[in-house]
Image: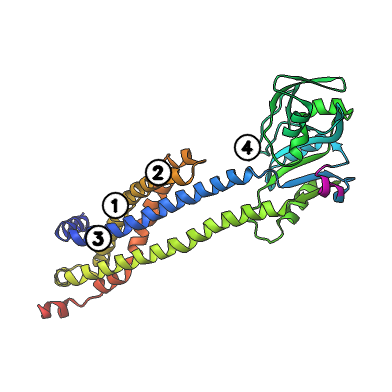
């Protein structure tokens, strides 16, 4: 209790030095909290934006002509629909957003279209996410821009494909690619129209290897998928995967460069303030040592003050850093803005744990000098 009383009295007596030290910790913690919040938001924002680019992983039947697939985007082979469930049931694999489809060219009223049957999107255990695209109900169809234009199709029309009638629920906007001549329906409807029950032509997915410790992440994906589907072929759209990886790594690299600089600057700031505090209290230290305070108690006195600085700076820094993130974040990360508005209490816990340690380390050398001062030399100077 005596040590705590001395710390409180010293803080009241030299409150300017104390507040400046608290300010240093507050700045360090505020930058840590705001940067961590921004980094997480940036990762989520990047993931959402990159998902709009589409699936970057293609799992194809063994008998697919890869050259033709690369030219047309259509697989000429098929594989069992059960393959989708096999992939979706695996834990710990590096893919997500599994979408099975069956695609074939055909003619409707003399117009060449691509009939595409889509199954509901599945996610492996532990990777549950909202679907990337619309989910198509049985008996309905989504019609591409050019197909709708050439065939004079409007929303609400009924399409008759073979013996199957489909209600048009959406005429899609122009995409500028093969999607414009697609008619999309539920997978089971397409299987019935094409007389290919329980068959699919490909499974699309998104890889989850943005920070894989290798320059060839597709080898990891192929190994994982081959262990489940040994007769499947795996292709990755490398440009899309690379863009996602580079964007996420860039944000982490910025964080890794900026935060150490802020921490070092604030640490030096605290060390200088502690050294000034030690010089101002030389005679006080000499008296304490002369009346029986050992070096350990003097050390505890200064480190205790550093811990108080760290705890107070942690709380203020968390509040200030959260306020910064909530003020500027939604304007920068528009898609994931709601996630920024909720305070991340985990950062408060880490701040309360790390800030006192940071303050104590920054104060350590001046504190050791104070604890090892010769009281006789100090009092002789007086």
Q: Is residue 275 magenta?
A: no
- Location of residue 337 in the rendering, given as x and y in whole percent from the top left corner: 47, 40
Q: Secondary structure at mark 2?
A: helix
**Sequence-first tag of 3 and 2:** 3
Residue extent of the magenta highlight: 68-74
Residue that label 2 marks: 326
Q: Is residue 71 magenta?
A: yes
Dots 1 and 2: beta carbons under 8 Å? Answer: no
| Residue sitting nearer the eye, 58 or 301 | 58
Along the horizontal axis of the image, is 164 left or right of 378?
right
Along the horizontal axis of the image, is 146 left or right of 231?
left
Label 2 crowd (10 A; few <14 / some 14-19 / many >=20)? many
Label 1 crowd (10 A; few <14 / some 14-19 / many >=20)? some
- Location of residue 118 in the rendering, given as x and y in whole percent from the top left corner: 75, 32
How many labels, in total?
4
Is 40 located above or below residue 380 in the figure?
Answer: above
């Amino acid at each position: 209790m005596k040590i705590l009383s001395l710390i409180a009295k010293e803080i009241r007596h030299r409150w300017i030095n104390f507040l400046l030290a608290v300010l240093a910790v507050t700045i360090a913690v505020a930058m840590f909290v705001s940067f961590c919040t921004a980094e997480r938001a940036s990762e989520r924002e990047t993931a959402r934006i990159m998902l709009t680019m589409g699936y970057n992983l293609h799992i194809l039947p063994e008998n697919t002509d890869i050259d033709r697939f690369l030219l047309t985007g259509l697989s000429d082979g098929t594989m069992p629909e059960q393959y989708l469930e096999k992939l979706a049931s695996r834990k710990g694999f590096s893919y997500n957003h599994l979408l099975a489809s069956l695609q074939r060219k055909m003619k409707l009223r003399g117009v060449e279209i691509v009939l595409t049957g889509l199954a509901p999107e599945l996610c492996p255990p532990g990777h549950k996410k909202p679907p990337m695209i619309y989910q198509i109900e049985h008996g309905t169809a989504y019609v591409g821009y050019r197909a709708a234009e050439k065939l004079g199709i409007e929303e609400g029309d009924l399409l008759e494909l073979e013996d199957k009638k489909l209600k048009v629920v959406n005429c899609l906007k122009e995409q500028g690619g093969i999607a414009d001549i697609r008619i999309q329906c539920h997978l089971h409807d397409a299987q019935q129209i094409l007389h290919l029950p329980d068959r699919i032509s490909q499974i699309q997915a998104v890889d989850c290897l943005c920070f894989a410790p290798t320059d060839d992440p597709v080898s990891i994906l192929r190994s994982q998928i081959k262990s489940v589907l040994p007769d499947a072929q795996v292709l990755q759209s490398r440009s899309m995967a690379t863009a996602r990886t580079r964007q996420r790594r860039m944000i982490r690299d910025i964080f890794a460069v900026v935060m150490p600089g802020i921490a070092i600057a604030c640490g030096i700031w605290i060390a200088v303030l502690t050294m000034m505090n030690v010089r101002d209290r030389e005679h006080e230290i000499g008296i304490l040592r002369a009346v029986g305070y050992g070096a350990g108690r003097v050390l505890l006195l200064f480190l205790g003050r550093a811990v108080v600085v760290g705890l107070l700076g942690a709380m203020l820094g968390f509040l200030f850093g959260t306020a910064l993130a909530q003020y500027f974040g939604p304007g920068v990360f528009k898609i994931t803005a709601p996630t920024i508005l909720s305070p991340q209490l985990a950062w408060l816990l880490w701040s309360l744990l790390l800030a006192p340690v940071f303050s104590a380390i920054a104060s350590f050398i001046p504190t050791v000098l104070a604890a090892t001062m010769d009281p006789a030399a100090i009092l002789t100077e007086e």
